[in-house]
Amino acid sequence: MRSWRGDPGIWRRGILIGLVAIALALVLLLHSRIPNTVGNLGSLIETFLPWLGLLIPVLLLLGLLRKSATALIAVLLPAIVWLNLFGQLLVDRTGAGGDLMVATHNVNADNADPAGTARDVASSGADVVALEELEASAVPVYERALAPTYRYHAVVGTVGLWSKYPMSDVHPVDIRLGWERAMRATVRTQEGPLAVYVAHLPSVRVKMAAGFTARQRDTSADALGEAIADEPISRVALLGDLNGTMNDRALNAVTSQLRSTQGAAGSGFGFSWPASFPMARIDQIMVRGVEPESSWTLPPTGSDHLPVAARVKLDTVS
């Protein structure tokens, strides 16, 4: 810093870096205002919003190399906004309690080792397990592999639920697809009934011509949100692959009603996809009427997604 003293250029240099820093701060601060009218640009940015923080050290380094006080001061703006948005995720909020452990896993229809994947998930100790993207020919394999651990189970279309506790009121949930990719069941725990929803929302794609194509997913999210809003049981858990993050405003019909266990009781971002290099948490465990105690990702299986798990406390609602 001594070499900067008496150098009037420290305020004139790095103007472009400063402008980029201000633009980054505005994107982070006003991401919900970015329109989805062109290529669902807003949802695309919100899906990978935490990663924009990687630009901050780059801009900081450039400001130092340019010996620009203007740039360094400007870089403080996106740093403060990013920490306000995601700083709490850098703190370990996990607890040791919980009455029930739940897990969800998109097992991948092309999974070459469904039996091994089932055993891996069962070995986690989860009391309730939701599986998505179940290939019809592989369902008997999962059933046999999970039967020793889970006495009760139900499969609806391409999703299924396995439980150590009795289940009732099992039925499909219409998410406006024309085929079954969501279900609901009442799990009769020792602390009382828990309404469990399992959902696999449609995939999204990023295309050069069309942008972020997510209309079908957004429609299904709205339908799922309507079903959850009509749920009469006070304790609710949603397990599944939502093909979207908590930041994506297109999932607001769901996220506005439920708490993310990772956001409430996790450590880190809990990215779950792709398994080889997780970049986004699109596999979610969300709850209402119960208290999240801890949330984490499980080790990789034969799928392209990581399983996610959570422990929740059920005796918070009478």
Image (spheres, rainbow, N blue to C red):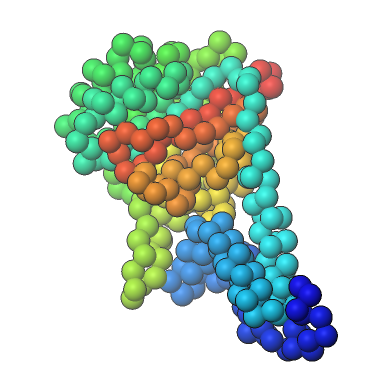
Q: Residue at x 59, y 38 (%)?
A: 267
Q: Position of residue 176 (x, y in %)?
A: 38, 49
Q: Position of residue 66 (x, y in %)?
A: 64, 80
Q: Is residue 30 left or right of residue 136?
A: right
Q: Position of residue 76 (x, y in %)?
A: 73, 67
Q: Residue at x 35, y 13 (%)?
A: 149
Can residue 87 be seen in the rendering of this structure? yes
Which of the two residues, 102 or 78, is positioned nearer the viewer here? 78
Q: Is residue 227 left or right of residue 118?
A: right
Quick check: 102 above or below 133? above
Q: Residue at x 64, y 69 (%)?
A: 60
Which of the two residues, 296 or 233, is positioned nearer the viewer here? 296
Quick check: 318 above or below 178? above
Which of the two residues, 81 or 290, is positioned nearer the viewer here? 81
Q: Position of residue 286 (x, y in %)?
A: 55, 37
Q: Is residue 295 left or right of residue 219?
A: right
